[in-house]
Image (tube, rainbow, N blue to C red):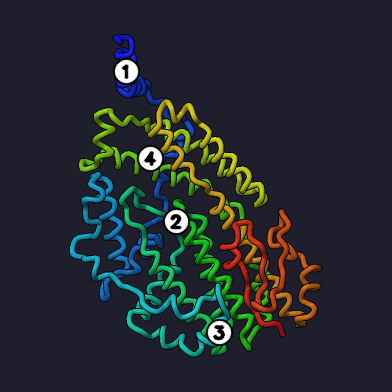
């Protein structure tokens, strides 16, 4: 009976012994590589040339200068992050209320060039939308934004940090594209193409300089919308040799634009910042449990593993799409089979698992944007040569753009029912609905 009681007592004490033992295991040292990636980027862009401030000022209240508000908002974010107050603080600068910020209405619902040919609807309804409510003000602000020569994030990116007004940014971008299409239709072709080229430069600068994932994805989306606008102009009754020439000169994303390292560095800094914030939260049950040792966590081990995985992901960008998917699956599998890690340090291992999310889809979005450029060039060639519907498939087969991916076969096909050039994206069926160029053959 005593032996049985001892066994039962030992079993009951096992969780306590387990917690004591794993609490005695020291955290590892932060690796030299992780320390290097965690260093904040030095601010090198003059404030008066940095579009980051104007981006924050896009939704400034009516009657307020966008730069003045943007600089005040950025300064306030810096103050809150430096204080460590986080969620308990108001990120709005003094004298401003969130309810006063500009809201867009009806812009994104008008017509999406990604989903349909929009020239008729732009002609019928576009001018009305451009003149409604705050839209003229947004259009003017967006033109000021894209005229800026540089972009660099100057605010820290933490767990509770607000993000730039992405909805207003996309709506302003759509308004600008609608205005450009209207001008082109009115015969202002040279001016419109110059402004489209300026917009393209701004879009690509955002891609290169974005240092967090959501900013990079929005920048890619904006460039995609601009490319679709070039496609829409090819459907105009006023297509020109200059338009075709400009499309032919659009280059695919260069290594600086496809590089993912700056984004992954930013995401690692965000992870470390968020983890620190969560652990220091005064009203956090999670933080309290960690502080008293009942929920052990190894901060450095999480960051080191995330750094290792991010480095491997960063090296994928030049690989063909199928290899990217394979390598990403291998990284995820290695994280999932770390059984000893889960036994020794379950919470830390769980957080490592979360921090090792599959990033292949984000890398492939760069590949698909290059594919969109290739489809646009193919459409311009078909239009220029006056290829009939019956001969489009043969023309595609003999074209240098017969594959959407230059390093892996992804056949481009003509879908008469959808009036579109389409390719099968490595990202799957959902992406296939976006990766198409609409057009009406001659």
Q: CA distance from mark 2 to mark 4?
A: 17 Å
Residue displayed at 43% across by 27% down: 343
Q: Nearer the viewer, residue 73 or 428?
A: 428
Q: Is residue 35 visible?
A: no
Residue displayed at 30% across by 72% down: 102
| The disc label shown at residue 8, or none | 1
- Residue 7 position (above or below residue 274): above
Tally of numbered discs: 4
Q: CA distance from mark 2 to mark 1?
A: 53 Å
| The disc label shown at residue 118, or none | none
Q: Is residue 329 visible?
A: yes
- Residue 105 position (above or below residue 91): below
Q: Quadrant of residue 424?
A: bottom right
Q: Secondary structure at mark 3?
A: helix
Residue at the extreme top of the image, as rendered: 2
Residue 88 % position (x, y): 21, 50
Q: Is residue 390 left or right of residue 262?
A: right
For disc 4, the marked residue is 272
Q: CA distance from mark 1 to mark 3?
A: 78 Å
Q: Which of the two labelled residues, at mark 2 and mark 3, occupies the earlier sequence position?
A: 3
Q: Which of the two labelled residues, at mark 3 and mark 4, occupies the earlier sequence position?
A: 3
Q: Which of the two labelled residues, at mark 4 and mark 1, occupies the earlier sequence position?
A: 1
- Which image quarter holds the C terminus? bottom right
Residue displayed at 36% across by 60% down: 164
In this rendering, the label closer to the viewer, 4 or 1: 1
Residue 122 % position (x, y): 50, 85
For disc 2, the marked residue is 214
Q: Nearer the viewer, residue 173 or 99?
A: 99
Q: CA distance from mark 2 to mark 3?
A: 30 Å
């Amino acid at each position: 009976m005593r032996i049985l009681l001892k066994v039962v007592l030992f079993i009951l004490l096992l969780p306590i012994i387990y917690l004591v033992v794993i609490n005695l295991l020291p955290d590892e040292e932060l690796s030299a590589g992780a320390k290097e990636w965690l260093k904040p980027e030095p601010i090198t862009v003059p404030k008066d040339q940095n579009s980051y401030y104007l981006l924050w000022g896009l939704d400034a209240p009516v009657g307020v200068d966008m730069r003045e508000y943007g600089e005040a908002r950025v300064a306030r974010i810096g103050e809150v992050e430096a204080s460590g107050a986080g969620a308990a603080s108001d990120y709005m600068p003094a004298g401003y209320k969130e309810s006063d910020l500009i809201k867009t209405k009806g812009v994104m619902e008008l017509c999406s060039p990604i989903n349909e040919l929009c020239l008729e609807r732009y002609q019928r309804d576009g001018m009305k939308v451009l003149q409604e409510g705050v839209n003229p003000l947004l259009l003017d602000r967006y033109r000021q934004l894209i005229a800026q020569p540089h972009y660099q994030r100057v605010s820290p990116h933490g767990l509770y940090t607000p993000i730039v007004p992405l909805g207003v940014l996309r709506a302003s971008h759509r308004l600008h594209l609608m205005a450009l299409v209207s001008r082109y239709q009115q015969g202002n072709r040279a001016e419109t193409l110059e402004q489209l080229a300026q917009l393209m430069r701004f879009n690509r600068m955002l891609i290169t300089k974005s240092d967090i994932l959501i900013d990079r994805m929005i920048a890619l989306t904006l460039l995609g919308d601009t490319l679709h606008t070039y496609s829409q102009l090819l459907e105009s009754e006023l297509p020109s040799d200059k338009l075709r020439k400009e499309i032919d000169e659009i280059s695919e994303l260069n290594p600086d634009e496809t590089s993912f390292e700056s984004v992954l560095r930013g995401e690692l800094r965000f992870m470390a910042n968020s983890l620190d914030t969560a652990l220091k939260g005064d009203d956090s049950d999670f933080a309290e449990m960690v502080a008293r040792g009942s929920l052990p966590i190894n901060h450095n081990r999480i960051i080191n593993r995330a750094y290792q995985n991010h480095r491997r992901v960063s090296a994928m960008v030049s690989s063909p799409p199928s290899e990217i998917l394979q390598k990403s699956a291998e990284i995820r599998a290695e994280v999932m089979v770390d059984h000893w890690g889960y036994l020794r340090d379950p919470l830390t291992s769980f957080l490592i698992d979360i921090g090792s999310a599959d990033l292949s889809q984000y890398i492939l979005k760069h590949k698909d944007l290059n594919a969109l450029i290739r489809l646009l060039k193919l459409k311009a060639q078909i239009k220029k040569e006056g290829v009939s519907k019956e001969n489009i498939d043969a023309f595609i087969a003999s074209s240098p753009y017969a594959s959407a991916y230059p390093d892996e076969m992804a056949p481009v096909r003509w879908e008469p029912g959808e009036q579109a050039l389409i390719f099968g994206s490595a990202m799957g069926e959902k992406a296939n609905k976006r990766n198409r160029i609409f057009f009406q053959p001659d």
